[in-house]
Amino acid sequence: MSTGEIASSLAALPHFRSLEPAILERIAATCVLSTYRSRAPIFRQDDPCRGFFVIRAGRVRLFRSMPDGREHVVHSLREGQSFAEAALFNFGSYPVSAEAVANPTEIIEVQGRPFLELFYSERRIAAAMVGSLCVRLLSLVQRVDELSATSAAARLARHLLHMPSRGTPITVELSTSKRELARLLSITPETLSRLLRSWREGGMLRTEGRKLVLLDVAQIATIADGG
């Protein structure tokens, strides 16, 4: 992939969309593109940080390994999203593991050392990234609030309503398995299955494999609001 093609992918990120093409080309020159098969690790928890990453195609899950062997899913990411910036700027190592969950998954790696040289020498890059990361931090705080203060049904409803959708009636497609979705929402797989079954029987949605057809968006929105 050419530097120009990588720059085009970077331009779609909130971090960089306000930057001029010449600066994007300089950032792209610090990047490499890699392709991963499903379940392949991108990095492991506690690995030294070598940079941050942008998903050009496919999906990625971030998870922490617990002392008892369980895995706690931190985030499920899709095309056009980035991850591991905080590790580069602050931690020095990766606090979570990352692995591809689609085959193939294309990842742009923004290599740490050359990018940091640009970051500290070009104020426009720093300003753009700080603003974007502040917005992301706010969304993470809101997610913590939701997980601690809302019911399992409300969490599921909000997740479905915020997913990319298409068509009429609205159709969303799960980017992960139902087990992974349950982990993301901090509920048990059994609770997720029970909710989906109840909503199907109540005429609120229809399942078609990984696709969910939302037949009663108003009722799902009511549940999302705690009703």
Image (tube, rainbow, N blue to C red):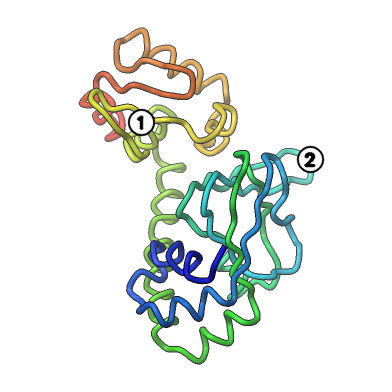
* Image label count: 2
Q: Residue furthest top?
A: 201
SS label for mark 1: helix
Amino acid at pointer 1: Ala
- Label disc, if present, on residue 68 of the rendered structure: 2
The answer to which quarter of the image holds residue 37 is top right
Real-space Cα separation, disc 1 to disc 2, in angstroms: 31 Å
Between 89 and 110, the one nearer to me in the picture: 110
Between 69 and 42, the one nearer to me in the picture: 42
Quadrant (top left/top right/bottom left/bottom right) for the C terminus = top left
Write the residue at 43% across / 16% down.
208
Q: In terms of sequence position, does the residue under pointer 1 or pointer 2 come before the other?
A: 2
In the picture, measured across the screen, residue 106 lies left or right of residue 93, that is left
Q: Tell me: residue 97, above or below residue 188.
A: below
SS label for mark 2: loop
Residue 123 in the image: x percent, y percent? 42, 88
- Label disc, if present, on residue 214 of the rendered structure: none
Write the residue at 69% across / 73% down.
92
The answer to which quarter of the image holds residue 16 is bottom left
Q: Which residue is mark 1?
A: 157
Residue 131 in the image: x percent, y percent? 37, 73
Residue 46 in the image: x percent, y percent? 75, 61
Q: Tell me: residue 190, above or below residue 184.
A: above
Amino acid at pointer 2: Asp
